[in-house]
Amino acid sequence: MAKKIKVKQLKSGIKRPQNQKRTLEALGLRRIGQVVEHEATSNIVGMINKVKHLVSTEEA
């Protein structure tokens, strides 16, 4: 069974490049303080690394 990662949005996507806005949207994040849980696949980890300055992560 794959590990789970909790991702929390800490900063806004406003005035960010379009690819970062789309990455937040693809992760399921819409507002500051929202937390979503994903499996720790290589695709998800890569998406988190693209917006690591906007989010925080922890293992679930």
Image: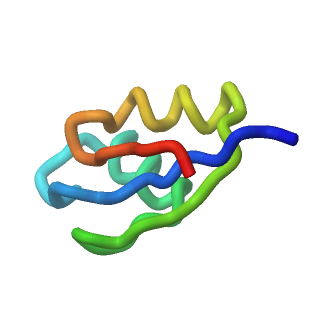
* Residue 7 spot, x, y in % from top left: 43, 53
Q: Nearer the viewer, residue 23 or 57?
A: 57
Q: Quadrant of residue 31?
A: bottom left
Q: Residue at x 56, y 52 (%)?
A: 60
Q: In the rendered view, does 30 fall on the left or right side of 26?
A: left
Render colour scheme: rainbow
- Above-or-below relation of 11 to 16: below
Q: Residue at x 52, y 55 (%)?
A: 27
Q: Residue at x 39, y 30 (%)?
A: 50
Q: Nearer the viewer, residue 39 or 47?
A: 39
How many numbered discs? 0
Q: Residue at x 87, y 41 (%)?
A: 1
Q: Residue furthest left?
A: 15
Q: Nearer the viewer, residue 43 or 15?
A: 43
* Residue 20 spot, x, y in % from top left: 34, 42
Q: In the rendered view, does 26 fall on the left or right side of 41?
A: left
Q: Residue furthest right?
A: 1
- Above-or-below relation of 60 to 2: below
Q: In the rendered view, does 4 fall on the left or right side of 9?
A: right
* Residue 26 spot, x, y in % from top left: 55, 55
- Above-or-below relation of 54 to 35: above
